[in-house]
Image (spheres, helix red, strand yellow):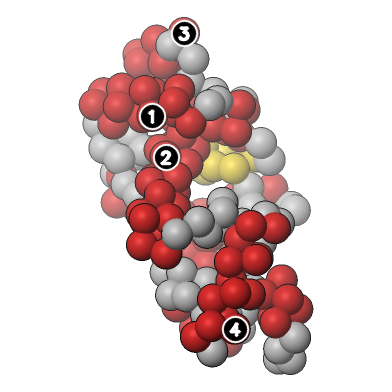
Amino acid sequence: MALKNSLLEELKRMGVRDSKQLSPFRREKLYSVITRVADKVEVVEVSPQEIDSRYRHGLNLNQLELIKMAQISLRLGVNTVYVDAVDVDEERFREELSKRAPNIVFVSEHEADSKYTVTAAASIVAKVTRDRRIAELNKFYGDVGSGYPSDPRTMRFIREYYVKTGSLPEFARTTWKSIRRTLGVRE
């Protein structure tokens, strides 16, 4: 997301902060403001099939996120990008991003979405996008829960779907360890 520095204080005053600290209703309201005032917003939804395919070829989810973050950063056309480090080593993550986008300065920190307004705004856009996708899945499939592997409703839905159809729904990753464990599938 590209935001003018002059807007950051205003967004902060409006309540832009880590999306996990906001209600769905509040996130939606802020999403409207953020997407209206941002110079550019880039959202990339990576399909479960792409994640599974990349995993089978030796690329884990953190590495895939690294690639996608670098691609988004390049498309934004900005000089500095603040990211929530998905690697346990923030500096290593920053270095890997810099290799993929050498003309950009990366600030890579854990919990960046609770420290930087621009990262918080991006987390709101990402969370609203995800919430909307889950709402679409709920309309199509019925109650799929939150879509997270820690959600008993999600795991129950996947188990029941698998028993009924003999396959996983299109939104489930076959490489998800919790799904494989729940279904008793070995790698």
Mark 1 or 3, nearer chain start:
3
Q: What residue type is labelled 2?
A: Val
Mark-to-mark CA distance, 4 and 1: 36 Å
SS at mark 3 in the image: helix
Mark 2 or 4, nearer chain start:
2
Image coordinates for residue 4, horizontal then vertical, percent: 32, 23
Determine whether, in the image, residue 104 is placed left or right of residue 175: left
Name which quarter of the figure residue 150 lies in: bottom right
Q: Where does label 1 land, which residue?
A: 28
Q: Where does label 3 land, which residue?
A: 13
Mark 3 or 2, nearer chain start:
3
Q: For marks 3 and 2, give the one nearer the viewer.
A: 2
Q: What residue type is labelled 4?
A: Val
Q: For marks 1 and 3, give the one nearer the viewer.
A: 1
Image coordinates for residue 31, horizontal then vertical, percent: 36, 29
Image quarter where the C terminus lies is bottom right
For label 3, the crowd category at 10 Å Cα-Cα, with few meaning under 14, some 14 to 19 and many 20 or more, is few
SS at mark 1 in the image: helix
Mark-to-mark CA distance, 1 and 3: 16 Å
- Residue at 47%, 75% (x, y): give it: 169
Mark 1 or 2, nearer chain start:
1
- Residue at 42%, 39% (x, y): give it: 128
For label 2, the crowd category at 10 Å Cα-Cα, with few meaning under 14, some 14 to 19 and many 20 or more, is many
Looking at the image, do the residues carrying marks 1 and 3 touch, with CB atoms under 8 Å apart?
Answer: no
Query: Is residue 171 among what the camera can see?
Result: yes
Looking at the image, do the residues carrying marks 4 and 3 touch, with CB atoms under 8 Å apart?
Answer: no
SS at mark 2 in the image: helix
